[in-house]
Amino acid sequence: MLEPVVDTEELQLAISLPDLDSVFNGRFIPLNSLTESLSQMSNFDAIFVGGISNELPVEKRRALSQICEEKGIELIEFENPSNDAVAIRDVVLNLADKLFSDEMPGNLDLADIRNINQYSDCLFAFNSQYSALCFLEQQQVGDVVGGVYLAHGDRNLREYEAINEALLKHFADDGFLCSSFHSSGRADCTILLGIRT
């Protein structure tokens, strides 16, 4: 009888957000000591950061990029077109929770987020389908090349499919959307959009 393939390596994820002092999943690193902490640690697969454009000076952001590149850590920077720090926080924490969750379907992996990050020039985080769709209707930033949509709560399949279709309508022809459920997610939903300028 065939045994299912089980990934024995646990995800090593660092998270750094302003106005936060701990996380349930992943390892929290304060923004003010981010570059110093990462230069001493090398075991992370990725780091989710939000608010660094407002919180860190340019030279610290450059140093952070360089350290991550040298250590092979995927630097994933979350932004919001309205600088909504709550939306960024919700999306980062919801994605981290989903990545560490056993909730089915288990169809979202760090590799999906990494692909979106690598094909994009910026990642925009939304915790409401309304704000994401309003942005997509009006945005002139660039092409949407990838995204993540997590439905929260007990959303029914018809609503879930309708939101997927509404999002995909604004994606580039070769764009891709990873969608799943996260029943205990914060806020209305989790939407991450990768934009190529």
Image (cartoon, rainbow, N blue to C red):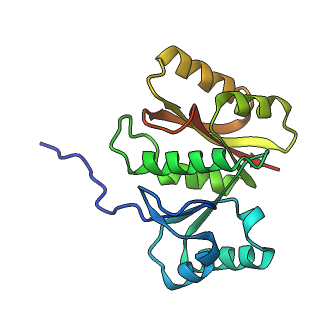
- Residue extending farthest top: 158
The location of residue 160, given as percent across then percent down, is 53, 22
**Vertically, is 86 above or below 152?**
below
The quadrant in which the N terminus is found is: top left
Q: Is residue 69 visible?
A: no
Q: Which residue is at 49% across, 31% downward?
A: 152
In this figure, what is the number of numbered marks? 0
Nearer to the camera, 41 or 121: 41
Residue 5 vs residue 170, the one in the foreground: 170
Residue farthest to the left?
1
Above or below, 58 against 195 in this view is below
Left or right of 130, for residue 20: left
Q: Position of residue 130 (x, y in %)?
A: 70, 27
State whether residue 169 appears in this view: yes
Left or right: 67 in relation to 1: right
- Residue displayed at 44% across by 75% down: 43
Q: Residue at x 57, y 31 (%)?
A: 188
Q: Position of residue 180 (x, y in %)?
A: 48, 34
Q: Residue furthest right?
A: 140
- The residue lying at 72 percent from left, 32 percent from top is 131
Question: Left or right: where does residue 34 sit relative to residue 83?
Answer: left
The picture places residue 57, in percent across and down from the top left corner, at 78, 74
**Residue 27, located in which quarter of the rendered image?**
bottom left
- Residue sitting nearer the eye, 24 or 177: 24
In this rendering, the answer to whether 74 lies above or below 110 is below
